[in-house]
Image: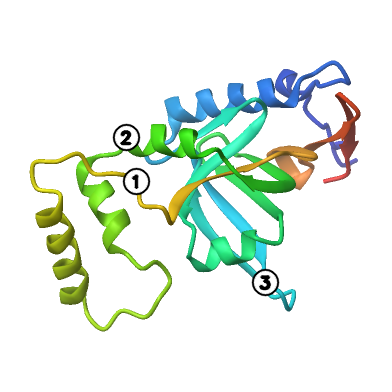
Amino acid sequence: MKDSLVIPQNPVTKMDASTDPISQFQTWMAEAAASEPNDPNAMSVATVDATGQPSVRILLLKGVENGAFQFFTNYESRKANELANGKAALCFHWKTLRRQVRVVGPVEKVSAAASDAYFEQRERGSQLGAHASQQSRPLESRDVLVQAVSAVEARYNGQKVPRPANWGGYQVIPTEIEFWLDQPFRLHDRFRFTRSGNGWQVQRLFP
């Protein structure tokens, strides 16, 4: 007689309607920061263009403020053009923890003050690069980029580097957050939180 399949119970997956998904995400992020060797805040950011063609790239989450997921980029980049439709999806994957989080919701620019505050925290080299890079546009050679950075460096020699007007932050305001946790035999745990009024409803999903 074959052994029967036993599905393990993991305390971390015991979520109910009272669970705050933002707090749960921050708990998982803190645990990822302690276990991931590189960039625990790395995330895939998915967008679509005007024709419905999807596009995805890896960015770094820079914070969760008032329940919104924030990141920063060039406002004239391909991703920014696609974010103009007002929607985005994020996906975090932590290999060491065998966990994943998906976030879906409308996207909007953060305030100029918030973008200024974050820009001031960046390393000077990154500040100079934000001025020099015409993100997503064709580049003739690496030398052209190096020369552009040198020109910006000379312009602000001995001065504070201001935030470029075409660079700043976005925030995704989640309407749906899904937590995924690896389990044996691909019988994974999945919990989807859907915003309902001022709260959240949670459902367990088939793997």
Examine the rendered structure and indicate whether residue 65 appears above or below residue 124: above
Task: State the residue at coordinates (69%, 25%).
Answer: 22
Q: In the image, residue 30 lies at what x, y percent?
A: 51, 23
Q: Quadrant of the N terminus?
A: top right
Mark count: 3
- Graded by Cα atoms within 10 Å as few (under 14), some (14 to 19) or many (20 or more), the crowding at tag 1 reads some
Kindly report the distance in space between the C-alpha atoms of the residues bearing marks 2 and 1: 8 Å
Task: State the residue at coordinates (23%, 44%).
Answer: 161
Examine the rendered structure and indicate whether residue 201 appears above or below residue 73: above
> Would you say the residues marked 2 and 1 are in contact, meaning their CB atoms lie under 8 Å apart?
yes
Question: Is residue 37 something one can see in this rendering?
Answer: no
**Residue bearing the label numbered 3:** 49
The colour scheme of the drawn protein is rainbow
Examine the rendered structure and indicate whether residue 165 appears above or below residue 183: below
Task: State the residue at coordinates (12%, 61%).
Answer: 150
Q: Earlier in the sequence, mark 2 or mark 1?
A: 2
Q: Earlier in the sequence, mark 2 or mark 3?
A: 3
Front residue of this view, candidates 91 and 1: 91
Please identify the quarter of the rendering in which residue 129 is found: bottom left
Q: Secondary structure at mark 3?
A: loop
Kindly report the distance in space between the C-alpha atoms of the residues bearing marks 2 and 3: 31 Å
Q: In the image, residue 34 lies at what x, y percent?
A: 43, 25
Q: Amino acid at mark 3?
A: Asp
**Residue bearing the label numbered 2:** 120
Q: Earlier in the sequence, mark 3 or mark 1?
A: 3
- Graded by Cα atoms within 10 Å as few (under 14), some (14 to 19) or many (20 or more), the crowding at tag 2 reads some
Q: Amino acid at mark 2?
A: Glu
Question: Is residue 38 something one can see in this rendering?
Answer: yes
**Residue bearing the label numbered 1:** 163
Task: State the residue at coordinates (32%, 35%).
Answer: 120
